[in-house]
Amino acid sequence: MMRKLYGFALVLGLFSGCDWKPTQADDAVVVARVGQSVLTLNELEQKDVYRREMSPEDSTRAVRSYIQRWAKDQILVERAKFNLSDQQQDFDKKVEDYRRDLLIFAYQQAYLKQNLDTAFSKEEIQSFYNDNKDMFTLRENIYRFDYVALPTNSPGLDDLKKQFFKADDPDDFIEKVFAFAKLLSIGDTSWFSFSDVIRLMPSLSEYESDFISRKKRVIHEDDETIYLVALNDVKLKEALAPVEYVESSIVTILLNQRKREVLRALEEKLLKDGIKKNQVEFY
């Protein structure tokens, strides 16, 4: 009751500077009207527009905003009814079709979640790749490389540079620099575009030509950091993408194919079961 009185007082205060006042209709306090539609104080309270922890000023703004939004919506509805033909206003079939589609989609997703095998063997991926190589032409240059970013004041920096590019004992190098290296990747066989390189090491933005020309060593030094890059392999734009580079795309394609197969099998099974149980008849 206190909350209702508080809300009533708030709405009265909201309109205290206006000519219009809340009115009584069928034992309900009406706070707004658009045509034949009314917004009552009880409906307003049920929307929980204002809260006790709000200041009176904030509560007033919140209530005013809600009432104005309600009025705008009602005006739009009234204008739509006036301007749209009966056929345009007939949403029953559209709503039923939409509801049907939502039900089917929800059931399909639940069924897939329980019955879809999302794992693919290397052989399946390689087979699809071999059969569809024309789909996997590179749209940009890609690279394999090792890299490390070290502080310029690193102990034994000259020896570390020599050891990195010599690459005869990577484990020993990693052990030496692991504690203070800012970036470090050695032995990764993943492929990266030059945009990936820049995301990793923005300071190397000017070295794309070195990557394209297959330069084996890239060294860049600024005030605080020295970047060492050993380029291991390059695939240029328009070449066939390595299977490892497109593996995730292949998995997505195969997964979509498998989804369609599972759902098709489900539909056929349900139809056969329906016919067998006399739930489905064709005339």
Image (cartoon, rainbow, N blue to C red):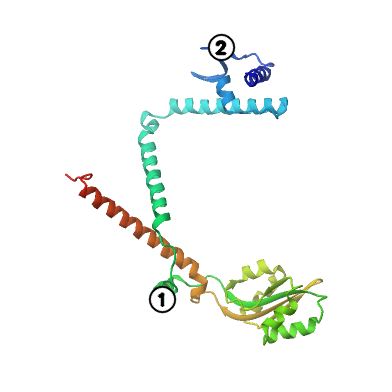
Quadrant that contains the N terminus: top right
Q: Nearer the viewer, residue 126 or 205?
A: 126
Under mark 1, the amino acid is: Asn
Q: Position of residue 117 (x, y in %)?
A: 41, 62
Quadrant that contains the C terminus: top left
Would residue 17 appear left or right of 255 to someone viewing this image?
right
Would residue 24 appear left or right of 205 to someone viewing this image?
left
Q: Position of residue 82 (x, y in %)?
A: 44, 25
Q: From what the image shows, is residue 251 above or below residue 152?
A: above
Considering the numbered disc 1 on the image, is that residue within a helix, a strand or a loop? Answer: helix
**Residue under the image location 82 percent in, 79 percent down:** 155
Q: Which residue is mark 1?
A: 130
**Residue under the image location 44 percent in, 26 percent down:** 81
Considering the numbered disc 2 on the image, is that residue within a helix, a strand or a loop? Answer: strand
Foreground: disc 1 or disc 2: 2
**Residue under the image location 39 percent in, 53 percent down:** 111
Q: Which residue is mark 2?
A: 24
Q: Estimate the spatial distance between the alpha carbons at disc 1 and disc 2, rounded to whole Å.
A: 78 Å
Q: Position of residue 176 (x, y in %)?
A: 74, 79
Q: From what the image shows, is residue 81 above or below residue 189?
A: above
Q: Earlier in the sequence, mark 1 or mark 2?
A: 2
Under mark 2, the amino acid is: Gln
Q: From what the image shows, is residue 82 above or below residue 247?
A: above
| Mark 2 Cα shell of 10 Å, populated few (<14), some (14-19), many (≥20) | few
Q: From what the image shows, is residue 110 above or below residue 251?
A: above
**Residue under the image location 71 percent in, 81 percent down:** 173
